[in-house]
Amino acid sequence: MPDGACVIRYDGARGVVWKVKYRDADGRQVKETLGRASDGWSKRKADAALRARLTDVARNGLRKIEPATFASFAEEWLDTYPDAKGLKRSTREGYEMIVRNHLVPAFGTLRLDAVTVERLDAWVAEQRRKKVEPRTVNRRLNVAHLIFQAALRRRPPLCRENPVALVDRPKEPRRRWTILSPQEVAAVDRAFVELAASVEGGEERRWREQARVVFLTVMYAGLRRGEVMGLRWRDVDLADPDGARLRVRETFVRGASDTPKSEKGERTMALGKRLSEELWQHRRVTAFAGDDDLVFCHPSKGTPLDPKRYAVTLRAALAAGKVERPMRPFHDGRHTSITNAAAAGMSPAALMARAGHSDFTTTQLYIDLAGETFRDETELLERRLAAGTSTEFEGTPRRRASPDSFKTGL
């Protein structure tokens, strides 16, 4: 046993506590509390822990953990990590909310090395008892994971491991999207027209008429909520001789304008005649038709579109159109647009560009959902592989091809 390394039994007011003492890779003395006897610690278990620490010193250069509370380091992380990564404003605000509203209240007073897997598991169980959705819990754990990774990279490190990596995470339910069929889209469109006609005029009628154009824009262009809310007339070109087009280069997220989250999100898309005409008629009647005005806004004030008010109006149109399934106004609307585009035969590359996806894996979800089986490519393969065999499959027995028959086919 190296000089100064030993196991210490401490008889305290709350029972027996086991500790170890050793020198780290820098020669500094380390005294570490392992735990109470009431929690299962014993002389034998403490000896094993000490041997493990000494092995880590020799093999991995283990160094003394600097004392730091979760709260103090998390605040320091918030001050540096978002700038280092160049995160968008909305992402920064999301991280700040998670850290200050959820992680710090749970672990703030603890030292980083005292936030154990067991404590995190207990926190996850508490979150689930409070009916917090698995996806939300996992998002909060993701932020905690980033914080502990940063603490591990410190020299000397502020913790020995990233406990989040060992947490038993709640399983997220399979995604359930409401995808409208073309017939349902048409029914909801007609319902919007009837809803607008049911009021005499004024702001409410203008609002319902605009809500219909919002619905059609989401259906035909597949824009995200922030993209719909941030769209300005200067980015909608309806008079281009080569065809109408729409540019996505501004979003409205968390109460402020911003740029798209990724480079792929900033894109230009062609507009079909139907949506072009609807947007043309909308600009003709809106009181806010200047280049810098928002395309979709409060009918009287020109302020950003109220997504909650739009959700209420859409639910009324869905009910009138006999669509009884629950539908998220923008999220499922975008899914409807992209999935129907895939089903209509839009190429995967065009689908990915139009949707603004950074990863084709995301686009593939819509292709799978649409049942797109690449039939043309499949038939080309069959014709190639079947060269030299009979093509009369119905009512005629297929003849066996000789080996020579494949020479021209392959």
Image: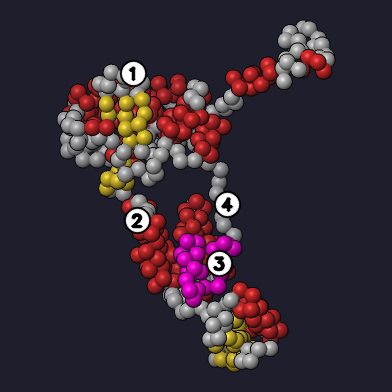
Per the model, the C-alpha gap separating discs 1 and 3 is 55 Å
Task: Tell me where the magenta segment starts and ends, as one range.
Answer: 144-167
Left or right position of 174 against 287: right
Q: Residue 322 falls in which quadrant of the image? A: top left
State which tag comes first along the sequence, 4 or 1. Answer: 4
Q: Which residue is mark 2?
A: 93
Q: Disc 4 or disc 1, which is closer to the eye? A: 1
Q: Give the Cα distance between marks 4 and 2.
A: 26 Å
Residue located 56% across and 43% down the image: 174
Which class describes the residues within 10 Å of circle 2: few (<14), some (14-19), or many (20+)?
A: some
Q: Mark 4 or mark 2: which is in front?
A: 2
In the displayed structure image, the side of residue 40 where residue 28 appears, left or right:
left
Q: Residue type at mark 2: give it.
A: Glu
Earlier sequence position, callout 4 versus callout 3: 3
In which quadrant of the rendered view does residue 96 lie?
A: bottom left
In-front residue for pair 183/68: 68
Is residue 77 visible from the viewing direction of this image?
Answer: yes
Relative to 52, is 75 above or below?
above
